Structure formats: structure tokens, C-alpha cells
Amino acid sequence: MPTTFNVISIGQLADIDTNEGNNTAENASALVGLTFGGPGDALVNDFVELSPVGNPGSFYNMNNSPNDRFRIDGGPVQTFDATALYSATITYVDGTTATFSAVVMQDVNGNTYIAPEFSNNADQAALEAAPIQSISFDGLLGNQYSGTTANREEWDFVPCFTAGTEIVTQKGMQKVEDLRPGDLVLTMDHGYQAVRWVGQRDVPAVGALAPIHFDAGAIGNEVALEVSPQHRMLVTGWRAEMNFGENEVLVPAVGMVNGEDVRQIEGGQVTYVHVMFDSHEIIYAAGVPSESFMPGEMGMTAMGQAVRDEIFEIFPELKVEGLAAYGSDARPSLRASEGQLLLH
């Protein structure tokens, strides 16, 4: 697991470690009862990338001389100061809720962050279940720590294909990792459209980052297909019409897992590839329709700062006018749980 990972920035808050030199964050209870984010100010917009300065190893220690240090989105050096654990409630953008244990990190200036988990546990699943609108700290679970684990889970928000997936282009079938800006790809709605950006990342194929595998023929695909868990596939037919009033909907791949011909497979490394057009498109992978990269709140906040800067250079209107300037999803989108209802 990496020591560079995404965290949720929740602002500059009261100092939770008021007495230096011991292993207690004496003022941690000052954050109990506070809510961060809300309608019109969703926390899904507040993901930032934390990276170590030097090599903190597998632990951020708050009693070193000097304490361990880190950067946020490649910015100025910050000094780690304290950590605490809270019982907390997540409210998702769709209004549903979940409870989890929130790991909180703070620097010496009170800049405070909610960290992902150090393993793929139930708390991490809650953090990744849906776009987060707000988080409330309900109680203090622990404030006597000498630091916090630096090897943490990556957030899984970015929809993408795995390397080797064949895409229908004007030149025939091409592997997704071989696509380049300017290449013409067949879309369901707008014919051949030029690729504007291609990006990729290598991650461990474990936990929430493990790909979803579709056996050949599972959803009409000509050959086996693998995509990231949040990558959305087009589902059509009477079930979508009956349950959601739409003939065509996009369903996260993880919501299509049935344990038989659609499975999540762990092990080794996986290369995920993102393909972006002038608008959100339905393209053809392994012969079946699925989505291109959509620079929405979850997708962009899960990207590192360098990748966000690259996309904003290609699409400067997104940085000036906001991500809504890109337009809407190509089709109505379901949550993973709704996909399970639809398909089973």
C-alpha cells in the first residue's frame, strides 16, 4: 500500500494536541459534534493528495525531532502533529447514511484531514460506497497514539478500462492503452469522436481496487472483459424501464457481480486506462457499450494533482467554470445497489 494517498480536507480546526511531547491528543474531543460538508458543499469536492517529505516509512510519528512531514497536492511542507479516532456518520449525496470509524490526521497549524483505512475493511467500504456529502463526528474513540499508519488504502473512484481491452476505432479494434489524442473512436451517440486525453495508473489488484471480470458472453461481450469497480456499463431493456423509468441506464461494474460469470478478481497488479472525449460518451469495449471517463466530482478528486492539472490544461473551461461545464452523463446512472436490484 502507498504512503502517497488521498485524504479528505476538512479545514483548519482547533488544535487537538495541545501538550507536545506525549502520546495524547488532549483536545481531540473539541471536534466531537461537528459536521463537515453538506448540501451545496459536498465533501466529495475536498479530496486532496497527501505525499511524504523524505521517507516516513510505514508510520507518521508525531514525537520525532522534527516530526514527520508531508505535502498536500504538492504544496508547501506541512509538519505532522497528531491523530485521533472518531465514531462518525457519513451522509452520501443521495441522502443515505452509514457509520464508520474516522481516522483523523492534523498538522501543527490545525489543518485537518480524514484518512483512508490501512486495510480494505468495512470502514473503507463505507468511504467508497458512494459520493460523500458530509461527515459528522459523533464521539471520540481514541486519542492516545504516537502517530498513525502511513501505508494506507487508495480510494477507488475512477472509472476505467484495464490495459488490453480492445476498443472499436475508425482503424478497427485497438487496445485501449494504445489510443492517443486525435484517434477516432466509435461512440453510440455521435459517431466517430476524437480522443482528447488518455491516462493510466498501475495499482495493486486487491480489495476495492481489484478489477471486475466479465466472462466472455456474460453481458454480450465477445471476449472476457475487465474494468475498474466503478466503471459503468450500459444496461438496457424492460427491467430498467420497469424499475427506473429509463430504457437505458449506466450501472457500476461492481453492481453487476453475481459470483458466477461476473466476479471481482484479486491478485497482482492491474493497469487502469482512462479515455476522455469532448463529452461523456458511450463507446464499445470487447463489443459491448460502456462509458468513457467523466471528469465529475468523484473522478477528478481521486486523481493526483499532476493529472488534474493535465486535464485542466486540455479543458481550461473546467478549471474556470467548474466540472459542470463538461456537461451531463451520457445516460442516467444507477448506484451499485440499484444495479444489483436491476439485474437480480
Image (cartoon, helix red, strand yellow):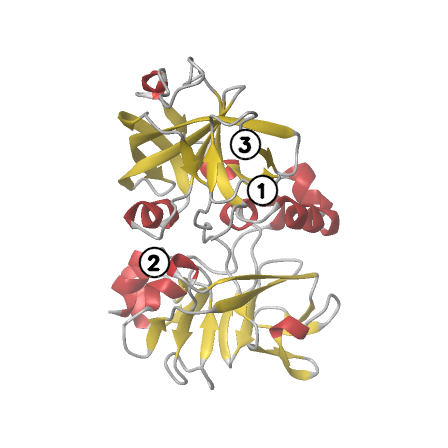
Report crowding for label 3: few under 14, some 14 to 19, many 20 or more residues within 10 A (C-alpha).
Answer: many
Kind of residue at disc 1: Asn
Name which residue lies at 66% across and 33% down.
75
Foreground residue, 204 or 80?
Answer: 80
Residue 182 picture quarter = bottom right
Q: Residue at x 58, y 69 (%)?
A: 189
Residue type at mark 2: give it: Ala
228 left or right of 32?
right
SS assignment at label 1? loop
Residue carrying label 2: 336
Residue drawn at point x = 41 percent, y = 69 percent? 267
Count of all numbered marks drawn on residues in the image? 3
Question: Which residue is the site of mark 1?
Answer: 55
Work out whether mark 3 precedes mark 2 in sequence or the reverse, and give the earlier one: 3
Given the image, on which type of amino acid does mark 3 rest? Asp
Location of the C terminus by quadrant is: bottom left
Q: Residue furthest top?
A: 19
Q: Position of residue 215 (x, y in %)?
A: 39, 81
Where disc 3 sits, the SS reads loop
Q: Which residue is mark 3?
A: 68
